[in-house]
Amino acid sequence: MKLLFINNVRLSLAQPLSDTDTNMVVSKAEEPYNDPIIDSNNPDFSETFIRLTIVDDLEPEKIEIVTVTDLIEETATTYQFAITRGEEDTQAQSFDSDAIVYMAHTAEAINRGHFKDSSVTATIGTFGDQAIPVETGVFGVVSESITLTGAWKTISRPQGVLTLDIRVSDFGASPTPADSILNGNPISITNTEYSSGVSADIENFFLEKGKVISVVILSTDSNVEWISLTLDGRVLITTDSIN
């Protein structure tokens, strides 16, 4: 899960919040502040979460950190969020209407780091009136360590049927079928220019900096002239401590 930050988020409770409530209704931000960006209809939302801090006053006696897990309802003036209470060693507490709700850089986010989106893309093709031969491949050296999410997408032209293998090997060693990270489950494309899916075999696979990643055509119906494969991933961003 990726922790999402938005600058200058400040809201207020539109309704009182008890210490057992798991839904929270907040009034939308007023200028110059921002609303959090939450769209539960966006599939990418399932890979992100946000943390909000609730205080009873600008000089608070009560402080609580919550995680927003879903947007339940949005009106012209309010959001209703599903929340997880008492995060990061804070306690679930009751708050009155108009309590301040804002986004802060919390200790967990700073100390443990967070993820930014990244990807790996490979393009194979003859780029002419000639189909890609079987066992054609491309390779590259991984410049930054990345954790693959398992999600992949392709663009291929013209439409056709083919299968792809992904191999990871040490620098200087020729990649072989034994270096495949798909465990015998190649990525398959069937008569579509745009295709996508999720491979459980590479979900959370750690692609280490300095390794060589190869994408190889295993089979084809001799129609496809070029294909581009993108693997979605995440790069961990950490903050170094200052002594």
Image: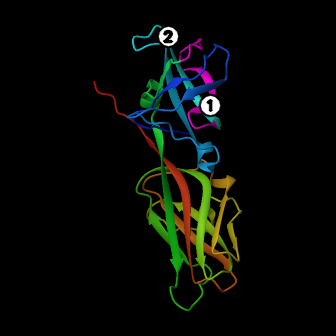
Q: Given the current orientation, which residue lies at the most extreme bottom position?
A: 129
Q: In the image, residue 99 lies at what x, y percent?
A: 50, 17
Name the image quarter holding residue 178: bottom right
User: Mark 1 sits on what residue?
Assistant: 81
Residue 91 is a magenta residue: yes
Which quadrant, please, contains the C terminus? Answer: top left
Secondary structure category for the residue under label 1? strand
Which residue shows up at 59% across the image and 44% down it? 39
Q: Identify the mark at residue 4; answer none if there is no mark.
A: none
Q: Is residue 154 above or below residue 56?
A: below
Name the image quarter holding residue 188: bottom right
Q: Identify the mark at residue 62; answer none if there is no mark.
A: 2
Name the image quarter holding residue 140: bottom left
Residue type indicated by callout 2: Lys
Which residue shows up at 70% across the image and 84% down it? 221
Residue type indicated by callout 1: Phe
Q: In the image, residue 225 lies at what x, y percent?
A: 58, 84
